[in-house]
Every structure is written in structure tokens, then in C-alpha cells.
Image (tube, rainbow, N blue to C red):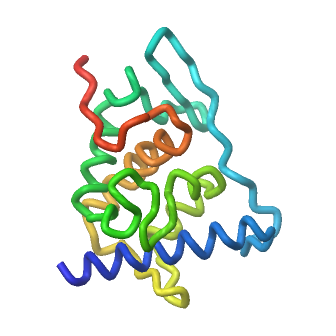
Amino acid sequence: MRTMISGAAAFALSLAVHTVATAQGTTEQAGASTAQAPPAQTTGNKVTRTEAGKPLYTVVDGYKVDSNTMNGFRAWRAAACDRCHGANQQGLVGPSLIESLKTLTKAEFVKTLHDGRLEKGMPSWQSSKMVMDNMDNLYAYLKGRSNGDITRAHVEELKQ
């Protein structure tokens, strides 16, 4: 339990540093691009976003999500990310992930979770099977929250 809390706190710190660096225009990689909202297809109350030509997530009524995005939410809960980022991803001791994922690219997100940023207190989540197995799903869930397509932090699986 203690490791999980420390890891979550370190992840929060890492994203906070990235957010500040981005706001100041000092990203670590020259020419780093910002993570803009991927294109969306909207039909009534259903939104489907794609990224790199592949489905990222589908959400209906702002809180009913596809099974992969639901698994991302489950990984969020299992890793106790809310302890630092808040139950609504609004930020507590860690930054708001809703704001951070407006600028954090998927590659930066994956690298931060996989490798950590030890010099900034962020350990690697490589040893967490739940996080590693659901990295893309976790990204989809948080990106949906950041884009405003997922309007509630607590989601339900879309019935097919």
C-alpha cells in the first residue's frame, strides 16, 4: 500500500513539473508537440474519437464508455491515482490530469508511466501489471476526461 501511494505521489509530481515546464515553454524535448484533441465523430449523444487512425474511445451521454476505456478507469482506481490527482482528476497534491493531458502527448504519458522520472521522484510503474496492461486504456480514459467528452469521473460500461 505504501509503495502505491508513493508511486501515485511521484506520478503527480512528475506531471506537475511537466505542466509547469510546458507552460513556461521549456519542455525537455526540442520541438515537442502538444497533445491536441483527436478528431471526433459525433452522432446524437455518442462521441467517438480516433488517434492515429485507430479508435481511442467511445462515450455516450458523457459517462457510458467502451470496454477498453472502462478498463482504463478500473486501472485508475486500482492504482489509487485519485489520492494525488483527486477523484475527479482535478488535482490535489498532484496536478489536474484534466489540464495536464491537454498538453501531454501520448508518448510522454507512456514514457512517464513506463520509465518514471527518478530525478523528479517519479518511480517507474513497470512492475504494476495492471497499469502496464492498461496503459493505452488509462490514457484513453484520461484523454476523454481532458477533452470534455467524458463528463463524469465515475463511468459505466456501455452496453453493446
Q: Quarter-wise, where is residue 114 in the image? A: bottom left
- Image x and y of residue 98, in percent: 52, 51
Q: Quadrant of the C terminus?
A: top left
Residue drawn at x 78%, y 73% is 26
Q: Pick out the residue farthest to the top.
A: 44
Outermost left residue: 1
Quadrant containing the N terminus in the rendered view: bottom left
Q: Is residue 51 above or below residue 14?
A: above
Total numbered circles: 0
Q: Position of residue 27 (x, y in %)?
A: 74, 71
Q: Is residue 19 above or below residue 158?
A: below
Q: Residue at x 41, y 63 (%)?
A: 85
Place residue 86 in its image quadrant. Answer: bottom left
**Residue lying at the far bottom of the rendered structure:** 119
Q: Nearer the viewer, residue 21 or 118?
A: 21
Q: Residue at x 75, y 55 (%)?
A: 33
**Residue 55 percent location from the top left of the image:** 49, 30
Residue at image location 48% in from the left, 36% down from the top: 56
Image coordinates for residue 66, horizontal then vertical, percent: 33, 30
